[in-house]
Image (spheres, coloured by chain):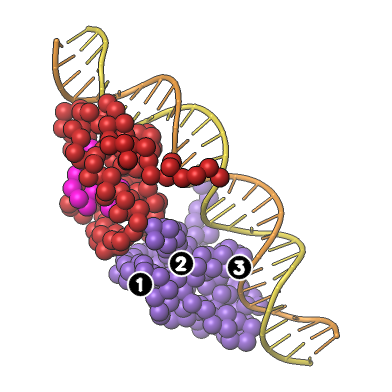
Chain colours: A purple, B red, C yellow, D orange
DNA sequence: GCGTCATTTCGTCATATGGCAAAATGATAT
DNA sequence: ATATCATTTTGCCATATGACGAAATGACGC
């Protein structure tokens, strides 16, 4: 039990994975959509999704070539529900989560087919370039 | 905010630290008492307590030579309360937590002064020896 | 002041973790 | 069957983490 608790808590404790959970509160997303928002390599995102699924926080669904992940609807273990509720109640006004939602809006406007092909390049320039890259040199 | 969330979640996600939180639900304990129950080095326990305190989950109080830790009573950040509540509701029947409570009962029966001097040696033989050490050789 | 003693900090080690590129997988469509 | 393509797995690297012993801290009592 402690071991399960640890697995779930550790899954939630990583910032990339917390971002994913917040993203999925808006509904299921396929891997390439999550990848586009987080701006990480597909391999990394896949591993995060697997960790969340192992923790009982997510479930997946295949649709053709794409695999969609969503927040777990049934209790795969004793703690998943509690942690999902906690996350849902947290980070509501977090800047990163807010920015992610904004990017997600653009991502969702692009057909998955195109997104998987082109990644962030398929997004409007203001986002595709990333928001941090415009900062002045150090 | 995400960073604070991460700090608190990571603090909770370690099994030794989760055990400490469960122990402290019974009321404040001094470092050597926690050390005796967890059966880890004082240095390690101290670091865990510091991590929990940094996360806003604990506060401390000095009494003479001893330092007592207890669950945070006021909200040091936006997430501490939620996580403490979650932990309180979890691991209720966890074997490790249960065993820890049992050991704590013996530990509490020993004056802190003696406990700090002798550590686990101050406990009744059945516990001082540890429960796992009686297993057969591999 | 000075030793004592609980606790903390430091230095070190072994292991765990997150990241990516490259290769493997597995379902779809031709 | 085979090529394609989204996703996953593998291998590798750099960093983070938890453990301990030894040294440092800091409050207490003489």
**Residue B106: image x %, image y %?**
23, 41
Gap between marks 3 and 2, in whole Å?
20 Å
Gap between marks 1 and 3, in whole Å?
27 Å
What is the quadrant of residue A7 in the picture? bottom left
Where does label 1 land, which residue? A81
Instruction: Report crowding for label 3: few under 14, some 14 to 19, many 20 or more residues within 10 A (C-alpha).
Output: some
| Label 3: element kind | helix
Is circle 3 on the same chain as circle 2?
yes
Tell which subunit mark 2 falls on: A
Tell which subunit mark 3 falls on: A
The mark found on residue B15 in the picture is: none
Q: Residue furthest front?
A: B136
Q: Residue at x 37, y 64 (%)?
A: A95
Where does label 2 land, which residue? A55
Q: Quadrant of the C terminus of chain B?
A: top right
Given residues B66 and A121, the one toward you in this image is: B66
**Residue B63: image x %, image y %?**
16, 32
Query: In this image, A40 relative to B42: left or right?
Result: right
Q: Residue at x 50, y 68 (%)?
A: A54
Q: Which residues are magenta?
A: B20-30
Q: Is residue A2 in view from this perspective?
A: yes
Query: In this image, B24 relative to D15: left or right?
Result: left
Mark 1 vs mark 2: which is more N-terminal?
2
Is circle 1 on the same chain as circle 2?
yes
Q: Is residue A46 above or below residue A109?
A: above
Where does label 3 land, which residue? A42
What is the quadrant of residue B123 in the picture? top left
């Amino acid at each position: 039990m402690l071991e399960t608790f640890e697995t779930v808590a550790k899954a939630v404790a990583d910032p990339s994975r917390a971002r994913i959970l917040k993203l999925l509160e808006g509904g299921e997303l396929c891997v390439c959509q999550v990848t586009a928002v987080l701006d990480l390599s597909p391999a990394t995102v896949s591993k995060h999704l697997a960790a969340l699924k192992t923790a009982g926080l997510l479930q997946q669904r295949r649709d053709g070539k794409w695999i969609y992940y969503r927040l777990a609807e049934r209790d795969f273990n004793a703690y998943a529900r509690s942690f999902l509720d906690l996350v849902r109640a947290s980070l509501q006004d977090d800047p990163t989560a807010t920015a992610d939602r904004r990017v997600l809006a653009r991502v969702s406007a692009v057909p998955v087919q195109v997104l998987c092909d082109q990644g962030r390049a398929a997004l409007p320039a203001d986002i595709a370039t990333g928001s941090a890259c415009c900062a002045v040199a150090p």
